[in-house]
């Protein structure tokens, strides 16, 4: 671990997670390689909706439930001061996440761990003032690095946040260790660039790579990224020695442009970064140097996400074989819709698609002289989805699907989504913007010693 303000060596950041449900095995190699900070980025827009459903079922939930696994893996390194853990796995309930870590520590007989919880990104109490729906399941602003820096300065070994911007999780330890000023825009931009490159775990080390993906060595044992960040913001991006995957100019370049609308104005709560000035130098041996980022003042607003209930959905899929596979599938889905309409069920929206026709293709059957060269799919799977405001309406359509078995077209084959499928609750997630000063006033860091 470097001392704050120590320019003697780079700060080593390990990108330990790229999403909720990511593989946790590569974390061991990061810790063994020696990282000052293990940073686990767990949240996407979809993730927050999943966590909202969890909290609807149990108020004690709302955080990513694989969090204890990462804490347990890092515990020996946390306790002897070799590393610190920063994560936004607190989701929409960081307080509950902190309690979960405390429970894990007690169960394992661990003491001496200092856990900080960052709260204040939840703006639901101000929904009316902000013009947000009063039935919001969550409404969270994307915070920046400042509260994490505060937690690190207070001595936290583990920092758990709610909705913090992905790259800011990585920027915070750099500000803390190197003593960067909050108006040192170029260094802050360099830190955000580093975070942006490290935040997606294996995606920068050869995973999900759209170039020569087949050249990625041993993806089964892919190594997650390590960023060695100097005091001037220059980073060497690499991975643990002996792990699979690859770090090249192209894998890093592709990640740099991931989820970027305007490379000249990458908006972050802490700085507006300009990626067009970034230089990448492939040093070989899975090492790429990243330098040259520039930046400007941070936006006056935070981005936020608000989630509201959006009704219920149902789905069925049935397969039909040749001959007349497509015609049978279309007739079957029409049969289901017709019965629902005849029963007066208030379905708001229907959606049909046919695998093998307009979803994805496959081999075809030559019908010979009968069709003069026409080709027909050997089988077609019809998928019917429907949406309604009332859960009972969705369930009623699903229950009625079974009538197809003996009264619909021939050669029906089920695919696992049929009459017993439970209605799925739909959630709508929309962005909004909120004045940052009004949010910052409610942000706090709670530190507990376990």
Image (cartoon, grey):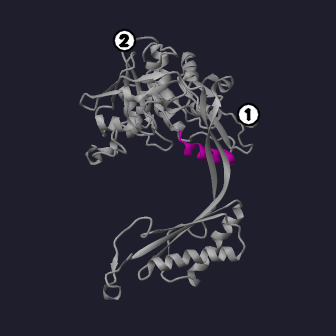
Quarter of the picture containing the C terminus is top right
Give yes or no for residue 51 being in the magenta stretch: yes
How many dots with numbers? 2
Locate residue 127, reporting x and y percent: 73, 37
Residue 8 is marked as 2
Query: Residue at horizontal 63%, vertical 41%?
Result: 62
Residue 126 is marked as 1
Query: Residue at horizontal 38%, vertical 29%?
Result: 276
Task: Evaluate whether residue 267 shows in this view.
Answer: yes
Residue 215 is marked as none
Whole-Å distance between the Cαs marked 2 and 1?
Answer: 46 Å
The mark nearer the N terminus, 2 or 1, is 2
Q: Which residues are magenta?
A: 43-56
Residue in front for this viewpoint, 81 or 442: 442
How many residues crowd mark 1 within 10 Å: few (<14), some (14–19), many (20+)? Answer: few
Locate residue 86, reporting x and y percent: 51, 28
**Which residue is outermost to the bottom?**
370
Mark 2 residue element: loop
Give yes or no for residue 189 being in the magenta stretch: no
**Which residue is outermost to the left?**
284
- In the image: residue 179, left or right of residue 241: right
């Amino acid at each position: 671990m470097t001392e704050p303000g120590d320019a003697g060596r780079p700060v080593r950041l390990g990108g330990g997670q790229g999403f909720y449900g990511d593989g946790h095995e590569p974390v061991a190699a990061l810790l063994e390689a020696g990282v000052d900070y293990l940073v686990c980025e767990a949240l996407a827009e979809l993730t927050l909706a999943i966590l909202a459903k969890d909290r609807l079922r149990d108020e004690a939930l709302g955080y990513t439930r694989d969090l204890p696994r990462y804490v347990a893996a890092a515990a020996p390194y946390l306790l002897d001061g070799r590393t610190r853990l920063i994560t936004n796995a607190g989701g929409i309930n960081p307080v509950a996440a902190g309690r979960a870590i405390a429970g894990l520590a007690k169960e394992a007989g661990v003491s001496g761990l200092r856990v900080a919880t960052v709260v204040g990104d939840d703006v639901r109490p101000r929904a009316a003032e902000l013009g947000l729906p009063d039935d919001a399941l969550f409404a969270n602003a994307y915070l920046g690095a400042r509260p994490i820096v505060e937690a690190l300065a207070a001595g936290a070994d583990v920092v758990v946040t709610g909705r913090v911007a992905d790259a800011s999780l990585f920027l915070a330890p750099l500000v803390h260790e190197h003593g960067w000023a909050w108006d040192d825009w170029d260094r802050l931009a360099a830190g955000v660039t580093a975070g942006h490159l490290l935040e997606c775990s294996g995606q920068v080390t050869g995973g999900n790579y759209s170039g020569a993906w087949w050249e990625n060595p041993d993806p089964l044992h892919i190594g997650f990224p390590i960023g060695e960040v100097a005091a001037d913001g220059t980073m060497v991006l690499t991975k643990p020695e002996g792990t699979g995957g690859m770090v090249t100019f192209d894998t890093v370049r592709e990640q740099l442009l991931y989820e970027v609308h305007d490379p000249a104005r990458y908006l972050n709560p802490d700085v507006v970064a300009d990626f067009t000035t970034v230089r990448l130098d492939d040093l070989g041996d899975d090492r790429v140097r990243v330098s040259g980022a520039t930046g400007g003042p941070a936006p006056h607003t935070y981005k936020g996400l608000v989630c509201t209930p959006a009704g219920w959905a149902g789905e069925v899929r049935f397969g039909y074989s040749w001959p007349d596979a497509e015609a049978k599938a279309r007739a079957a889905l029409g049969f289901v819709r017709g019965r629902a309409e005849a029963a007066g069920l208030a379905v708001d929206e229907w959606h049909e698609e046919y695998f093998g026709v307009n979803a994805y293709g496959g081999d075809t059957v030559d019908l010979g002289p009968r069709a003069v060269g026409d080709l027909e799919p050997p089988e077609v799977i019809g998928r019917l989805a429907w949406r309604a405001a009332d859960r009972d309406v969705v369930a009623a359509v699903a229950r009625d699907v079974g009538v197809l078995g003996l009264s619909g077209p021939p050669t029906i084959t089920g695919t696992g989504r049929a009459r017993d499928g439970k209605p799925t609750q739909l959630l709508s997630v929309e962005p909004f913007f909120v004045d940052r000063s009004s949010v910052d006033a409610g942000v706090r860091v709670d530190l507990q010693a376990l």
